[in-house]
Image: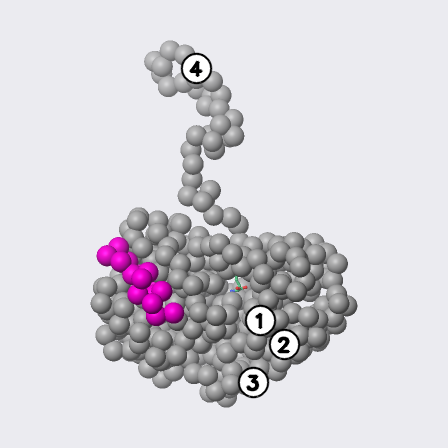
Amino acid sequence: MKHAPAGAGTIPPAQSPGAFFSTHPSRADTFTESVIREMTRLALKHDAINLAQGFPDFPCPPELKLAACEALNDDINQYAITWGAKDLREALSQRVKKFNAMQFDPETEITVTCGSTEAMMASMLAIIQPGDEVVVPEPFYENYGPDAQISGASPKFVPLADDFSIDEEAWKAAFSKKTRAIILNTPNNPTGKIFTKKELSFIADLCIEHNAVAITDEIYEHIVYDGHRHISLGSLPGMEDRTITIGSFSKTYSVTGWRVGYALADAALTSRIRKIHDFLTVGAPAPLQRACVAALQLPESYYKELAVEYDRKRQILYKGLKKAGFACDLPEGAYYMFTDISSFGMSDTAFARHLVETAGVAAVPGSSFYHTGGETKLRFTFSKKDETLTEACRRLERLT
Ligand code: GLN
């Protein structure tokens, strides 16, 4: 501080930023930076193949690129309506009715956000009061930890069973009078688990009994294998007005950098989400929202082909990892292989660093998916070109 207020008498001693930081704790001090994004930076530094952060290294469908260029040429350069361009909300409403068996009024029940990341944060800020408990199955996608810290939620982590199914007794025990919400990610990152109708019904019953909101992250809904079927929790009876369904264009259409996602919820929940969303971001990128309308016009065959492509990539990485000595199972959905590294005799973070520096392959340490534990796990993504995966496998095999 350079100037004392008039009449203050003495000039207070200058405060260094360090002094300010030590006397003014912040919610930002309660969590670390994203380990997933840090691994990307490390991969770039060491020129390693990035099987850490889940994003494709292949192009998005040409229809989307064309529509994005057209939007810019048409001067769609200014803000869209804060909760999303009307034509995109209308197209989403149609798509969700057909694919997810849920009805949302585009005028009052759909919010287009800056990716599913913002949809999750805006949803939590909209419904959580500090101290409210939120049930989170573990392992969980890294973001949910900081999301809880930022919104003031008190997370109740519930371990999934060894086969990643729902442990009913553990779930019942996790609910209390303070439970305000649950976070469910299906198909699941990092495990690949797709929750079954029976598991979803059990969770729905608990939410109804305890008057809790379900926030479901369904970003991998189209990336499913072996005849598994994605079911939206919000489509179950009694869940219509207590579910926030989160989705995104990122994974389905290979445009993770566009940052266009959405939150679907009944009008009462949506009005709160929209207010938070408005003051956080004003809105998602307008020209890209226009291009996302073109994405929703792709034929049904696009989604089938996407799953077939990812199935082939899944097999390439699975075989390579097995050959290199990693213990893993084929995931039911999403695009990650969650491996056990016990046989390598190193902890996850040390091993992840070793892999980047010596083998030239980046993966995510398992501990970033747990509040405690996960040191025997490592996550690899297979959202890459076949040749990228083949080269990564060749490098990993040299480890043994
Ligand atoms: N969901 C992706 C992952 O788990 C990307 C995360 C991100 O950086 N937004 O790797």
Residue drawn at x 53%, y 76% as measured from the top left? 331
Which x, y percent locates residue 239? 26, 73
Between marks 4 and 1, how big is the CA–CA gap? 60 Å
First in sequence: mark 3 vs mark 1: 3
In front of the other: label 3 or label 1?
A: 1
Question: Callout 4, which amino acid?
Answer: Ile
Q: Which mark is residue 337?
A: 1
Image disc number at residue 308: 3
Estimate the spatial distance between the alpha carbons at disc 1 and disc 2, rounded to whole Å.
7 Å
Closest to the observer, 168 or 306: 168
Q: Which one is in front in this view, the residue at disc 3 or the one at disc 4?
A: 3
Q: Secondary structure at mark 2?
A: helix
- Amino acid at circle 3: Val
Label 2 environment density (alpha carbons within 10 Å; few <14, some 14–19, many ≥20): many
Residues marked 3 and 1 touching at CB (< 8 Å) = no
Query: Pointer 2: what residue?
Result: 318
